[in-house]
Image (spheres, rainbow, N blue to C red):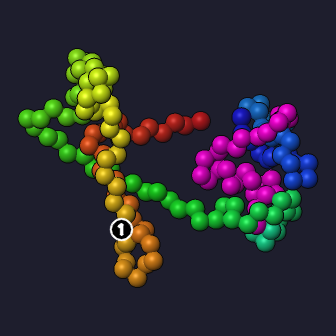
Amino acid sequence: MLATRIELDGRRATGVSYRRPDGQTATAQARREIILCCGALNSPKLLELSGIGGGAVLREIGIAPAVELPGVGENLRDHYAVRMTAKVRNVATINEKTRGWRLMKEAALWALGRPSILALSPSLVHVFWKSDEALDRPDLQITFTPASYPRGHRRTA
């Protein structure tokens, strides 16, 4: 199902219209509230398709503003990430410690309040850096993750 718009009664969201797999349109009415969770790009898109956003922006794309809310859909940036991995020798890696008996050992260490990989954040080092000193804030982010994870998989509809 694909959400197509937020239904409004004045400034109050009352439901969500959506397209069913058979192509028919339906509306789910809300008793109390609507929680919008469509991701960084689709959440503002759905708001704007529903007439919620900057008035000038909405009028420019032919949508009558229902709720003027400047800032919707602004300042979005891509978070492109380059994945690099390296193999190591003669050391037990985090990947190895998350399998079999080593994982049980790590779980026991964690339960006893001892240092364990289970208490680590997936990314241990974060660097924010300016690509140009003239910038007023960093525009690059480097993240170090001391384990390798499976490559992302794309699903096709």
Q: Residue at x 44, y 38 (%)?
A: 153
Decide which of 2, 12 is in the foreground and name it: 12
Decide which of 74, 124 is in the foreground and name it: 124
The quadrant of the image that shows the C terminus is top right
Q: Check if residue 39 falls in the magenta segment.
A: yes
Residue placed furthest toward the left: 90
Residue placed furthest toward the front: 113
Q: Quadrant of residue 91?
A: top left
The answer to whether residue 142 is left or right of residue 55 is left
Magenta-colored span: 28-54
Q: Report x, y in % for residue 36.
A: 70, 44
Q: How many marks?
A: 1
In the displayed structure, would residue 37 be above or below residue 125? above
- Tell me the SS state at disc 1: strand
Residue behind mark 1: 129
Q: Residue at x 37, y 63 (%)?
A: 128
The answer to whether residue 30 is left or right of residue 121 is right
Q: Report x, y in % for residue 93.
A: 19, 34
Q: Report x, y in % for residue 6.
A: 80, 46
Decide which of 133, 42 is in the foreground and name it: 133
The quadrant of the image that shows the N terminus is top right
Q: Check if residue 99 falls in the magenta segment.
A: no
Q: Is residue 109 visible in this depiction of the protein?
A: yes
The answer to whether residue 40 is left or right of residue 116 is right
Decide which of 135, 88 is in the foreground and name it: 135
Q: Report x, y in % for residue 99.
A: 26, 23
- Amino acid carrying label 1: it is Trp
